[in-house]
Image (spheres, rainbow, N blue to C red):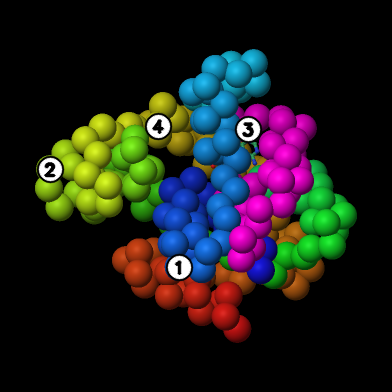
Amino acid sequence: MNIILLGPPGAGKGTQAHRLVAERGMVQLSTGDMLRAARTSGTEMGKQVATVMDRGDLVTDEIVIGLIAEQLDNGAGGKGFIFDGFPRTLPQADALGELLESKGQNLHAVVEMKVDDAALISRITGRYTCNECGAVYHDETKKPAKDGECDKCGGHEFTRRADDNEESLRTRLMNYYRDTSPLIGYYYAKDQLKRIDGLGEINEVAARVAGVLDT
Ligand code: AMP
């Protein structure tokens, strides 16, 4: 079962992807995580995309399609891939369709997570992650049980993304509405779109995701 999680920045795609990995043995393919890893390890491509990402703009289709193609070639799809943050443009969506077809695979569903814009801004500007295990926290809505200690792995180091500030977020939202939201119509026309309300407790949203995947 291969699925796409589609939605604006802060919709909760990463959080729900982590749940699906833990509960169903699926494999998360997040182009944002791959690009951040390339930056941290200082590759040529990582250096090239750094300023574009910090501004909140999209990196080129060529780069992200290349990253996804590489992962699909590795073939370790477990119980299926979760495409998180990819595709984000129509050419990326076409490329994904072709890549999957060339591997004899298909898309089971595209889950659109709907969240209103005001909620996105507060979700994003308060979020941080554990350096050790990637668990996601929030200043107001999801603090660790013990201050400064990750609930999952006990880590003490946390990071805020350089692009999780209000200015970059507005650019990311603009790019979402301009370049990514046409994918809603694209997948609707292909009869693959499932829409869910992305607002609410993580468990509630997870149940909605499960509801559309299991029907
Ligand atoms: P994300 O972690 O999905 O919010 O992505 C962080 C940043 O990485 C985005 O703001 C873009 O600069 C870049 N990025 C991630 N995925 C893509 C994609 N599919 N196409 C273009 N740029 C991307």
- Of callouts 1 and 3, the N-terminal one: 1
Mark 3 Cβ inside 8 Å of ligand 1: yes
- Of callouts 4 and 3, the N-terminal one: 3
Name the residue type under label 1: Glu
Q: Camera-side residue: 177 or 92?
A: 92
Q: For mark 4, does the 10 Å Cα neighbourhood hold few (<14), some (14 to 19), or many (20 or more) residues?
A: few
Left or right of 204 on screen, residue 2: right
Query: Compared with residue 82, is residue 169 higher up or lower down, i.e. above or below?
Result: above
Mark 2 Cβ inside 8 Å of ligand 1: no
Q: Tell me the CA gap for discs 3 and 2.
A: 35 Å
Q: Disc 4 vs disc 3: which is toward the camera?
A: 4
Which residues are the magenta region?
Answer: 57-86
Q: Camera-side residue: 14 or 18?
A: 18
Number of labels in the image equals 4
Q: Which mark is residue 161?
A: 4
Q: Tell me the CA gap for discs 2 and 1.
A: 27 Å
Query: Compared with residue 149, is residue 60 higher up or lower down, i.e. above or below?
Result: above
Q: Which mark is residue 23?
A: 1
At 34% from the left edge and 35% from the top edge, which residue is drawn? 131
- Of callouts 3 and 2, the N-terminal one: 3
Location of residue 191 in the rendering, given as x and y in whole percent from the top left corner: 75, 73
Image quadrant in which you'd find residue 160: top left
> Residue under circle 2?
147
Helix, strand or loop at label 1? It is helix
Q: Disc 2 vs disc 4: which is toward the camera?
A: 2
Q: For mark 1, does the 10 Å Cα neighbourhood hold few (<14), some (14 to 19), or many (20 or more) residues?
A: few
At 21% from the left edge and 35% from the top edge, which residue is drawn? 156
